[in-house]
């Protein structure tokens, strides 16, 4: 059902807005609208221009609470005052930042050590004391790398006429790392040769001890030691926040309330009158909440509330809030997927809940599989509150019921006797049509009933909207309903062998509704005494009307025949399970129970998904398209209701 909404204006002294928001509005659901936009007829309105004083502290509190491993299990310290909360957040931030600064210094030192490691890493195979090498007086050395394609040419030079030694280190796909040693007298010549071979020098600072491998390992140990210090700092920060968890959680919760309440100013307006400064808030509230709110503020001389009755003329369409019994609550998901009802439409949630579950049960009738859907859906909905799981559980109830009606349990049809028929083999003989499967006939008849119900719902919605054309002359209005009932009655009389109405009666039954549907626009204008003319000429109007009439008649037929899928899936479900049991060897009397179990699980999941989609298609295309627009917008309160006093 749709909750009735009222538009209210709340005003009072400007400096009292925080008290009113925190004391009253935070405990009710109200969708606030921009007062500057809605109250266009009020003069001297100005926006609030103030910075939220709680936002920075709140952001820090949210950050610190987010670091807590079990924040949801912490009991907030409710003894703190507002100043205490600010102090808790400030002190926590100060201590946390101090630890973070130490951590950043250690991280920076780690990065420096990693950089030194990267420099020394390619020379680890060199078995020499770096400190001594870097202080050679009578030997010139050059550390660096040479491209692989020049390495062999370099070896040739060394063997032929260069008085130098090259000691190789690591190598990769592109370069060979190492160092060459030469006497100072030959250094200039050798350097020139190596430059011509594109040798790239790598400068090593005198900061390493021992061999390159030993120096590399020393740096690795130093990095590991610093990482332990960083872990200790993280642990210290975590313990510091955990010790203050009750205070931080309390501060976060309260500051969040105050920050949200302060942000109400974004939608409020200021008005100065006789040097008095007022705030104005406006928005939508549920009718019941409005009564409780008015009762609560009646003795508060600083709060003035005006309930606007003529909201349609000034404030647009009210938002939509659905409130249905708990059993049908999950089916609101399907309504939201299609579109919420407008305030003057009926809420189809209960209708969808009943028809969807019923049709699903017919198409997927099996006691065992229905119980699986019921139990699985119920458990998921109970623990996870997933709406789809609630829908599956409800559909499972009807699947179980129709499993008894069809005498099917986990695909076995010889265990229990059907309370009605077995879909796969029960036939009915009809005049001129011969033998047809009974569930096909019942499915089409049921579809006719649902189409007529959808037309009745369309008429109700049109009457609520005071739409004469759609209520009386539309293809889904009274005229369309009379025509469709006449068709149904004629078909029933024909198939049961009873005499049909006379020609004149049938002409009236079929002709008058179609004429009303064809000329609905001019008839409506005449009833409403409107002076506007048709947008097209009479000839074009008749041509257009003819094709629209043909489309209407075709839709009656296609929508009705579409319901045959209910019977088709009921039969196919039984046939698929028969195949599963045959593959599992059930006919021999010694079934492979593993095959039976996995076959049932597969059919339950795969075919259940297909049936669920097909039923939703019937809801949307064969029924919703006839009576439901879904043009409403959701009720979006700025805060969730906590409690209601009184």
Image (cartoon, rainbow, N blue to C red):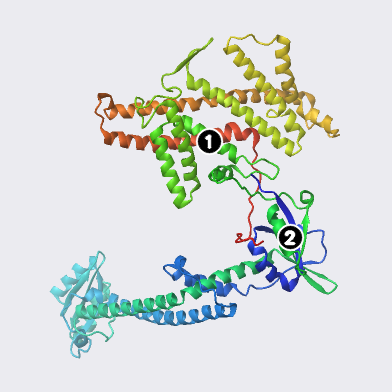
Whichever of labels 1 and 2 marks the residue nearer the N terminus, that label is 2
Element class at badge 1: helix
Q: Is residue 627 left or right of residue 11?
A: left
SS state under label 2: helix
Q: Is residue 53 above or below residue 507?
A: below
Question: Tag 2: Cα neighbours inside 10 Å, few (<14), some, or many (≥20)?
Answer: some
In the image, 511: left or right of 91?
right
Determine which of the numbered discs, if any, sits on residue 340 in the image.
none
Q: Name the residue under label 1.
A: 356
Q: Quadrant of the N terminus?
A: top right
The picture quadrant where one finds residue 148 is bottom left
Q: Residue at x 17, y 85 (%)?
A: 183
Q: Does 6 appear above or below 36?
A: above
Q: Find out whether the residues at labels 1 and 2 contact each other: C-beta distance under 8 Å.
A: no
Please tell me whether residue 554 is drawn above or below residue 386 in the rendered image. Answer: above
Q: Which of 422 and 526 is in front in this view?
A: 422
Q: Residue 246 location in percent, x, y? A: 48, 73
In x, y percent, where is residue 586?
A: 28, 27
**Residue on which disc 2 sits:** 294
């Amino acid at each position: 059902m749709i909750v009735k909404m009222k538009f209210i204006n709340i005003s009072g002294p400007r400096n009292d807005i925080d008290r009113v928001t925190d004391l009253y509005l935070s405990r009710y659901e109200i969708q606030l609208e921009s007062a500057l936009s809605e109250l266009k007829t009020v003069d001297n309105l100005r926006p609030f221009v103030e910075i939220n004083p709680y936002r920075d502290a709140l952001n820090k509190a949210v950050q610190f609470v987010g670091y807590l491993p079990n924040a949801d299990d912490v009991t907030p310290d409710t003894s703190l005052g507002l100043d205490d909360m600010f102090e808790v957040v400030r002190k926590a931030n100060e201590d946390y930042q101090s630890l973070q600064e130490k951590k950043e210094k250690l991280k920076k030192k780690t990065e420096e050590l990693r950089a030194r490691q990267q420099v020394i890493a390619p020379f680890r195979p060199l078995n020499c004391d770096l400190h001594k090498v870097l202080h050679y007086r009578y030997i010139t050395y050059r550390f660096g790398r040479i491209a692989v394609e020049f390495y062999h040419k370099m070896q040739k030079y060394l063997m032929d006429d260069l008085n130098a030694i090259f000691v190789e280190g690591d190598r990769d796909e592109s370069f060979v790392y190492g160092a060459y040693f030469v006497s100072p007298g030959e250094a200039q010549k050798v350097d020139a040769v190596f430059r011509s071979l594109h040798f790239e020098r790598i400068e090593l600072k005198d900061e390493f001890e021992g061999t390159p491998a030993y120096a590399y390992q020393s740096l690795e140990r130093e990095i590991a030691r610093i990482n332990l210090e960083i872990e200790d700092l993280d642990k210290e920060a975590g313990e510091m926040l955990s010790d203050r968890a009750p205070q931080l959680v309390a501060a976060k919760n309260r500051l969040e309330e105050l920050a949200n309440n302060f942000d109400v100013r974004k939608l409020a307006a200021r008005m100065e009158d006789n040097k008095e400064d007022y705030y104005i808030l406006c928005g939508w509230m549920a009718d019941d909440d409005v009564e409780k709110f008015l009762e609560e503020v009646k003795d508060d001389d600083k709060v003035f509330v005006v309930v606007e009755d003529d909201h349609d003329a000034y404030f647009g369409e009210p938002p939509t809030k659905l409130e249905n019994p708990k059993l049908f609550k999950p089916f609101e998901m399907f309504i939201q997927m299609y579109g919420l009802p407008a305030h003057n439409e009926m809420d189809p949630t209960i209708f969808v809940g009943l028809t969807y579950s019923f049709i699903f049960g017919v198409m997927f009738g099996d006691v065992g599989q229905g119980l699986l859907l019921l139990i699985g859906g119920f458990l998921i909905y109970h623990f996870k509150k997933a709406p789809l799981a609630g829908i599956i559980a409800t559909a499972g109830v009807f699947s179980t019921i129709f499993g008894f009606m069809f005498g099917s349990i986990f695909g076995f049809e010889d265990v229990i006797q059907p309370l009605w028929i077995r879909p796969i083999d029960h036939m009915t003989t009809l005049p001129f049509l011969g033998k047809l499967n009974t569930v096909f006939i019942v499915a089409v008849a049921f579809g006719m009933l649902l189409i007529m119900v959808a037309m009745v719902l369309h008429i109700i919605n049109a009457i609520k909207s005071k739409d004469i054309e759609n209520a009386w002359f539309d293809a889904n209005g009274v005229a369309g309903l009379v025509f469709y009932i006449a068709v149904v009655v004629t078909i029933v009389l024909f198939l049961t062998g009873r005499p049909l109405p006379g020609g004149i009666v049938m002409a009236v039954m079929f002709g008058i509704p179609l004429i009303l549907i064809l000329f609905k626009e001019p008839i409506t204008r005449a009833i409403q005494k409107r002076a506007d003319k048709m947008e097209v000429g009479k000839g074009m109007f008749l041509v257009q009307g003819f094709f629209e009439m043909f489309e209407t008649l075709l839709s009656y037929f296609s929508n009705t025949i579409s319901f045959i899928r209910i019977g088709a899936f009921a039969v196919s479900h039984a046939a698929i399970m028969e195949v599963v049991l045959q593959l599992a060897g059930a006919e021999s009397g010694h079934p492979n129970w593993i095959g039976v179990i996995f076959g049932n699980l597969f059919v339950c999941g795969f075919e259940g998904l297909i049936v669920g989609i097909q039923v939703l298609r019937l809801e949307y295309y064969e029924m919703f398209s006839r009576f439901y627009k879904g043009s409403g917008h959701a009720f979006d309160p700025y805060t969730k209701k906590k409690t209601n006093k009184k």
